[in-house]
Image: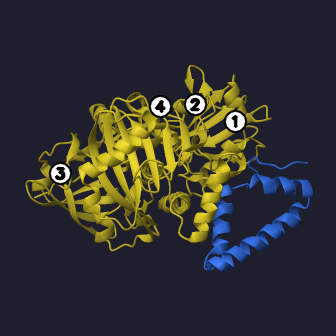
Amino acid sequence: MVAQRYETAFQLYPYQKVADQTAPPKRHKVVVIGGGPVGLGLALDLGKKGTPVLVLDDHDGAGLGSKAICFAKRTLDICHRLGAAKPMVEKGVVWNLGKVFHDENRLFEFNLLPEEGHRHPAFINLQQPYFERFLVEEINRAQLAGKPIEIRGRNKVTNLIQHDEHALLEVDTPDGPYELEADWVIACDGARSPVREMLGLGFEGRVFEDNFLIADVRMQADFPTERWFWFEPPFKNSGQSALLHKQPDDTWRIDFQLGWDIDRELEMDPERIRARVDAMLSSQTGTVPEYELVWTSIYTFQCRRMREFRKGNVFFAGDSAHQVSPFGARGANSGMQDAENLAWKLYLVLKGLAPESLLDSYSHERGHGADENILNSSRATDFMTPKSEMSRMFRDAVLHLARDHAFARPLVNSGRLSVPCTYHEFPLFGEDKLDGPDVTKPGRPCPDAPLGEGFLLDHLNNGFCLLAVNEPVADNLLINGIDVKTLSVTEPSSEMKQRYLGSNNSAVYLIRPDQHVVARWPEFDMEAIRSALRTAISSD
Amino acid sequence: MSINVEPNIPDPDGFYDELLAAHEGLSKEESDAFNARLILVLANQIGDRTVLQEALKAAK
């Protein structure tokens, strides 16, 4: 039997008995374990490219409860490429503005996306179950269009044995166990990854000694859709810091930092939680509004990662490979970058268009992303919870100065919000022959810009792309058997000029399927492009 | 010349990290002494008396 570990918010892929269960183990090309955002993103990406992919999840839908809520622009850009972003943005709460308070004082505010000319906002807040539902709905549409994606609900992987050419999976279902084989396995099974345990792999890092109380409350309130963060909040019994953030469905996420030595059971008492929430809300509105506690939990966190995100034919992506504190929204957002990084590489290798060594770059590139996230997240946590008398003294000095002096504000750290990873000077990236803007250097993800009736990123959605601005190029190219779509822009918008030309009259960019710049030149040079593409697929 | 209170340190998080790391393992007394030495080193680097006077005011 398959135990129910948690309640689901939506049933998305009900259990159905399939022929595999009563046949000798069938071989699948790619099996994704875990139907969270990362697993679903990978399945959609691979399936849309035509790679058969099977997702196994031990539940039949999106888990209820407090999970990811902040989805960053890069994640929306990825989901847009996958065809799933529209309902997310429609349902989500768009926000760009954050305010930081210390005790009774407002220290400063920050705008995350002061720049115009992007399809997507800096962030939306959206409960994770919706995010998963919109991905599954797009998967369902892809399935109807004949894309080879299958999701099996209430299929729990109980064992995984690695052989040279494949992995054998033992799977439990409501109708009993069966076995299947996979050429490649991607474990997207979360921070407590059972697959990681099955393979006896380590997960090293730092435990932070702190407890955070989450309360999601539903109410009608006039708070603006901004991120409000308090150091040493003035409202009663609220701990060392507090956060207020709006989600869809009139729901607000409230976080209280309670410290390390607490009685968890006592703190979870609804009356006690209500007293805290009452104090916070009334400090802002003068009265306690009517509200309903939708979800409460207490969490602690760790910052850690696997040393390698690949072991033979098994990959790890998302929380199974790396875990960070929630400050900065770097969990699900980095997981989606893992998914898009791995999908195109696996697709090319499975098609025989790139050598298997391309797959090693996944762990290298995304390990860098994980390190960056862990560093930022550890620093934020150390600022919020000073570990020594002296670090508290400096922290308080920064907060004191930040109120009147702008210079101290960049030092205030309530979480550095997720920005996309840059693979500057990584092996798969090529030359920078353009004296161009920093934001589009090789290794960078392409920034969006208005183009025609839509946006640039709308066009970077189908494999490798050659973007030529004010420069004639051949129609689509075929290099090493790989189609390179050309996108010729002759009347660049001002944003496009600013982000892709700088002071140059023309520019040519080779762009990876995950929208990262491989190399760039002032003019079209076929030999240089050919060589950069070989570098990009590890085929040098 | 007057005091610059606009952000002026590249990679502020990295700097803050190094500042705290310099205090790691020190007792409170040692940390206080370290801070005093650091202030004197930085003051000498600034040199300008007007700026130093304004800095003394800003920190109050």
- Which dot, 1 or 2, sits closer to the camera? 2
* Rendering coords of residue A457 (x, y %): 55, 33
Going by the image, does A420 lie left or right of A14? right
- Which corner quadrant holds the N terminus of chain A? bottom left
Amino acid type assigned to the residue bearing label 1 in the image: Tyr
CA neighbours of label 3 inside 10 A, class few (<14), some (14 to 19), many (20+) = many
Cα separation, mark 2 vs mark 4, equals: 23 Å
Near-viewer residue (A324 or A279)? A279
In the picture, which chain is yellow?
A
- Which dot, 4 or 1, sits closer to the camera? 4
Secondary structure at numbered mark 1: helix
Q: Residue A224, which numbered label?
A: 4
Residue at which label 2 appears: A118
- Which dot, 4 or 3, sits closer to the camera? 4
Nearest to N terminus: mark 4 or mark 1: 4
Going by the image, does A230 lie left or right of A66? right
